[in-house]
Image (tube, rainbow, N blue to C red):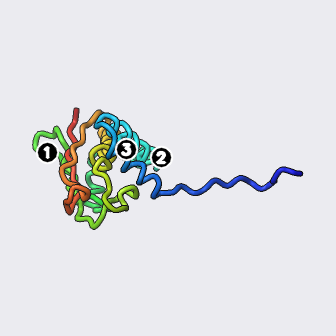
Amino acid sequence: MQPDKKKHLPQEMNHEQVRNLLKFVDSSQSEAVKESVFGRLGYECFHARNLDKWIGQYAGDVQAFLDYVNVDRKSRYWERLEFNADRTALVLTGKKVLGCACAFADCAEPTRSLCDYCCKSFQQELFGMLLGQKVEVEITEAYLYGDEHCSTVIRLV
């Protein structure tokens, strides 16, 4: 018998399987494990989509990015992005949303860890690169928390 010469084609990724796995991690693991797993998910989301290259075009010109959001209104998700009075934090006000931007949240009862750790990590990567320094992100409003907006405060460390 000759071996099958057809090229091996792996199964497509099963999104429901991944969502169920994330729900399992969220419901059964410690906060430290959830922070590690979901935090890495946010990091990977940012880098796998090559957003480092996109935000890199604004490196050294934060005002151009603020204009992208506030003046040009090009952001799909953000209404405003402004420094606070003493310029120690950026305040991001999200647009009104009808759902979460994350595909892993597209299910019944999505896990809040997607906001608490994944989105937080994603934004820490984005704004850390934009500002060229470490930042701490606080999610202040989120669709998964029951809010109509997804908003954050980005503190310079």
Point out the residue furthest to the right here: 1
In the structure shown, which secondary structural element does the residue marked by tag 2 occupy?
A: helix
- In percent of width and height, residue 91 lies at 18, 48
In the structure shown, which secondary structural element does the residue marked by tag 1 occupy?
A: loop
Amino acid type at circle 2 is Ala
Residue nearest the viewer, comparing 116 with 23: 23
Residue 97 visible to the viewer:
yes
Residue 127 drawn above or below residue 141: above
Which of disc 1 and disc 2 is earlier in sequence? 2
- In percent of width and height, residue 87 lies at 16, 40
Residue occupying the point 33% across, 39% down: 29
The quarter of the picture where residue 95 lies is bottom left
Residue 60 visible to the viewer:
no
Point out the residue furthest to the left here: 85
The quarter of the picture where residue 102 lies is bottom left
Q: Quadrant of the C terminus?
A: top left
Q: CA distance from mark 1 to mark 3?
A: 36 Å
Amino acid type at circle 3 is Val
Residue occupying the point 81% across, 53% down: 5
Which of disc 3 and disc 2 is earlier in sequence? 3
Residue at which label 2 appears: 48
Number of callouts in the render? 3
Residue occupying the point 31% across, 41% down: 124
Circles 2, 1 touching at the beta carbon (< 8 Å): no
Residue 96 drawn above or below residue 39: below
Residue at which label 1 appears: 84
In the structure shown, which secondary structural element does the residue marked by tag 3 occupy?
A: helix
Residue at which label 3 appears: 25
Amino acid type at circle 1 is Asn
Asked whether, in this view, residue 137 is left or right of residue 10, the answer is left
Which of disc 3 and disc 1 is earlier in sequence? 3
* Mark 2 Cα shell of 10 Å, populated few (<14), some (14-19), many (≥20): few
